[in-house]
Amino acid sequence: MILLKLLPLLGFIFAETIEIRSPRRTEYGDWQGWKNCPDGTYAYAVKHKVEGDQRGGDDTGLNAVALFCNPLHWTTYNTDREILSGEGGWGGWKGVKYCPEGLVMIGFALRSEADQRGKDDVAADNFCGYCGTPHGPRDRSNWISGDTPGWGDWTQDQFCPQGFAVCGINTQIEGDQGGGDDTALNNVDLRCCRVPAVSLSCTPSYTLERLTEYDNRLGAGTIQIEYQKRISFSRTTGTTETVGHEEKEAVLTKVTTGVEFSAEGIVKGVTLSGKASVNYEHSLSSETISSHQIQTMVQEVISSEKTITETYNVPAHKGVIIQQLFMTCGNIKVGLPKIVTRSS
């Protein structure tokens, strides 16, 4: 009995594709058949075919939805890979709507009108695609939808499971009723494909980068200075700084050794970036940061990327350099929460 209950779960765990369906408010017409993105690509843009308000005539609203496919972490807007599962015969195609750079479609919602019981039926009116990363959160933070008349209500959100992204579409479309009530597109189903885990080939390196400095050696009182530290992931090359969640997790697995700061100011395993305007002879106390501590910091950045403003009180007759610890793995750079001060 327990095994029978576990079978659906086991099927999901090992499945390479999952289908997500729009709630069936109307079900007129025939299913047009699945159209899938080329291997290794995922939906990242959408185009709507829409008939405008007929002002008392027979309205059909949304007539078709076309998706466009691109590889993960895309940086180029490409409409060559279009997939279309049929289309109604009314209205015209609107402009292409794109996910934010580097993101792909991870879910959708359909706006549709229920059966009007003898009055003019419209069925589906709009399609909204949700954008994100295959291993990231499932929410409405980024979305792309059409410009439509606005009939009906949005149905429940449908999301791919974690680790999947949209890779196919199937639509239910009613053909011309020959003088009867036409509805065109009624329902949309999307196929979600499992996204292979990211495999990074890199060894982390570390850099102390100067955020600010202040020379108060001739001052008679304490001076408060302000600086900002950016705790985030970014790219060192390419046209986008976006780093996918699965890549962040892959970076985390590469942290296997720690770093050490010597009492003389020499950093073992860390490069000092930038040249100070004054000579700081007594820089910092000896400190070792373990691999576990670095892993904890990277996990903190994965959980919450942010820019923090902090202050530091520079004593009279002292100078200080404020530095932040950065880790680089391949073309991915991580601003860690660790601050190191060097004082004279």
Image (cartoon, rainbow, N blue to C red):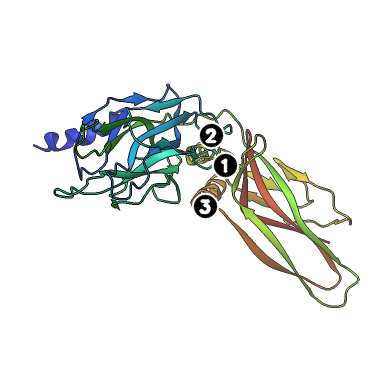
Q: Nearer the viewer, residue 254 or 193?
A: 193
* Cα–Cα gap, marks 3 and 2: 23 Å
Q: Amino acid at mark 2?
A: His
* Cα–Cα gap, marks 1 and 3: 17 Å
Q: Position of residue 109 (x, y in %)?
A: 33, 45
Comparing labels 1 and 3, the label whose residue is closer to the camera: 1
Q: Amino acid at mark 1?
A: Thr
Kindly tell me whether residue 262 is visible in this rendering: no
Q: Which residue does the numbered mark 3 point to in the structure image?
A: 300
Q: Which quadrant: the C terminus?
A: bottom right
Q: Which residue does the numbered mark 1 point to in the structure image?
A: 242
Element on which disc 1 rests: loop
Tell me if label 2 and label 1 are in contact, CB under 8 Å. yes
Q: Which residue does the numbered mark 2 point to in the structure image?
A: 73
Q: Position of residue 316 (x, y in %)?
A: 84, 73
Element on which disc 2 rests: loop
User: Is 94 on the left or on the right of 218, as rendered?
Assistant: left
Residue found 47% across the figure and 38% down from its top:
246
User: Is 263 on the left or on the right of 110, as rendered?
Assistant: right
Q: Position of residue 343 (x, y in %)?
A: 80, 61
Q: Which mark is residue 168?
A: none
> Which residue of the protein is positioned furthest toward the bottom in this rendering?
221
